[in-house]
Image (cartoon, coloured by chain):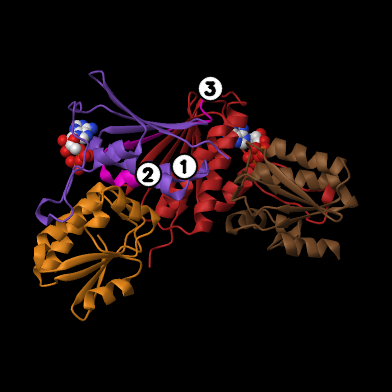
Chain colours: A brown, B orange, C red, D purple
Amino acid sequence: MNIETKKVQDVLVVKPAEKRLDAKVAVSFKEAMVEFINTGSTLIVLDLSGVDFVDSSGLGAIVSSLKVLGRKGDIVIAGVGTSVLQMFSLTRMDKVFKMFPTQEEALQALSR
Amino acid sequence: MNIETKKVQDVLVVKPAEKRLDAKVAVSFKEAMVEFINTGSTLIVLDLSGVDFVDSSGLGAIVSSLKVLGRKGDIVIAGVGTSVLQMFSLTRMDKVFKMFPTQEEALQALSR
Amino acid sequence: MSPSGNIKLTILSTLDNVPLLGASINKMCSLISMSEEQAFQMELCVVEACNNVIKHAYNNASDKEVEVEVRFFDDRIIFTICDAGTRKPTDLPHTLDYDPQDLDNLPEGRMGLFLIHEIMDEIHYEADGSKNIFTMTKFLSPKP
Amino acid sequence: MSPSGNIKLTILSTLDNVPLLGASINKMCSLISMSEEQAFQMELCVVEACNNVIKHAYNNASDKEVEVEVRFFDDRIIFTICDAGTRKPTDLPHTLDYDPQDLDNLPEGRMGLFLIHEIMDEIHYEADGSKNIFTMTKFLSPKP
Ligand SMILES: Nc1ncnc2c1ncn2[C@@H]1O[C@H](COP(=O)(O)OP(=O)(O)O)[C@@H](O)[C@H]1O
Ligand SMILES: Nc1ncnc2c1ncn2[C@@H]1O[C@H](COP(=O)(O)OP(=O)(O)O)[C@@H](O)[C@H]1O
């Protein structure tokens, strides 16, 4: 799976470069996230602005990554469109993850 | 077929209220156009801003209408998007019909 | 009641083909003037049902057929998903109860059936030994 | 060369069903990152080919099958349209020569085959007596 990353001070910005975060890529997405976490990233902004479809496997991989990270950091979500937002609200995962309209706002919130 | 019309001075504005002007609706579209022409409309703006797909049957119906009208008036096209524009340029019908970005510009040109 | 449109989509059972199905469903729903939100929900349900067929009914074998028929009516859409794999157990749970604050117990899976039941208006499953038929119906709000 | 995605779309032969096909093709092409223009062109060719099957091969009978298979490869898309109607005459003209100034002789039809030949890179037609198979190939520009 194609993922762009950049480091902004302490925060790792993770941006999947594919339109769909679904069952097809969920496993490799989770592996990548676990790798980021295991190499020391504890504050992560997941920028989903390029993603227009997430299914339950994709969402499961995000939740799974958060559980791997545990209480030693946080994963926040940025840039979701109408469709992906519904995925979070239908499953109430919008109560689990902090959601921000843009990457910038997410970064600001995490660096406070 | 659903078609909205309005009269602006001498000009009849014809706006198909469906997304596709295709083989399925081409016959009823042409019948409507012929009716407009036979009841005295000689200057027609065909506003395609609501249409995102035209196939060769739809285009044929537009050409056919122009031929029924003959030299006693004109049909000009307004509001085509990228896809519909290609239909006109691939068939060189953009050399047959005057094309305008908006209904307003088309109206202005016809009232001169 | 005769459908105003009818199409059957057939793929081989690999997750690579599911996005093709999903994209098709989404755009057909937009075509009949569903909102972006509703079109996404229809796509999601078909994708979840097909993922389940591939993962569970076919146990990830990639050379089987998954068939999705879509029937559009004025007042509803009916999706029928057919497979020839193992039959789905009855009484599978399709609820999603969890405490968003309880990190260790957040659900990482088992959300597909919940979503389908949440979104669709009618659901029916039938297995006749050689074929499993899963039917999902969504009623459409009357056009203005 | 194995396809990166493969789907078969089947409709009954009525013009009501062709938009469903068209919308599906369009969105699948967008999914593999084709431009809006190119996705429209692919949709147009499939729609023209299916309209021809319904109007000419099936003579507007509405209870026959039209099958469109789409195979996505890294460097091309292959569309295969199958019908069981009358065979297409060979050597049909597919040019579009006319004078845009000559109102009386503007073409009102016979633009479908021209468009298909203009847009597609390879075209093949095969009839084996019971089945007609029309294959259209479009090469993709290499990804950056
Ligand atoms: N078509 C099916 N055939 C067999 N078993 C199924 C099928 N669909 C679902 N199941 C079973 O129901 C469970 C819950 O499905 P679901 O909510 O979609 O979550 P997931 O597939 O992520 O586990 C699956 O784990 C599986 O055991
Ligand atoms: N699949 C087909 N089977 C039989 N005849 C066909 C088929 N496709 C095209 N034709 C013939 O070729 C002619 C030109 O086709 P086309 O350019 O698509 O224009 P149109 O269908 O508008 O006439 C048709 O009028 C028809 O006689």
Percent across and percent down for residue C26 are: 48, 49
Q: Is residue D12 magenta?
A: yes
Which chain letter matches label 2? D
- The amino acid marked with disc number 3 is Asp
Relative placement, left or right, of D8 versus A50 is left
Labels 2 and 1 share a subunit = yes
Distance CA(mark 1)–CA(mark 3): 24 Å
Q: Which residue is mark 3?
A: C63
Label 1, residues with CA under 10 Å away: few <14, some 14-19, many ≥20: many
Q: Which residues are magenta?
A: D2-22
Percent across and percent down for residue B5 are: 24, 71
* Between marks 2 and 3 in the image, the one whose residue lies nearer the viewer: 2
Q: Which residue is mark 2?
A: D41
* Between marks 1 and 3 in the image, the one whose residue lies nearer the viewer: 1
Label 3, residues with CA under 10 Å away: few <14, some 14-19, many ≥20: few
- The amino acid marked with disc number 1 is Cys
Relative placement, left or right, of D32 versus A111 is left
Q: Is residue D56 visible?
A: no
Percent across and percent down for residue A34 are: 81, 40
Q: Which residue is mark 1?
A: D29
Tell me which label, 2 or 1, sits earlier in the chain.
1
Which chain letter matches label 1? D
Rendered position, B43 above or below D41: below
For label 1, the SS is helix
For label 2, the SS is helix
For label 3, the SS is loop
- The amino acid marked with disc number 2 is Gln
Q: Is residue D139 magenta?
A: no
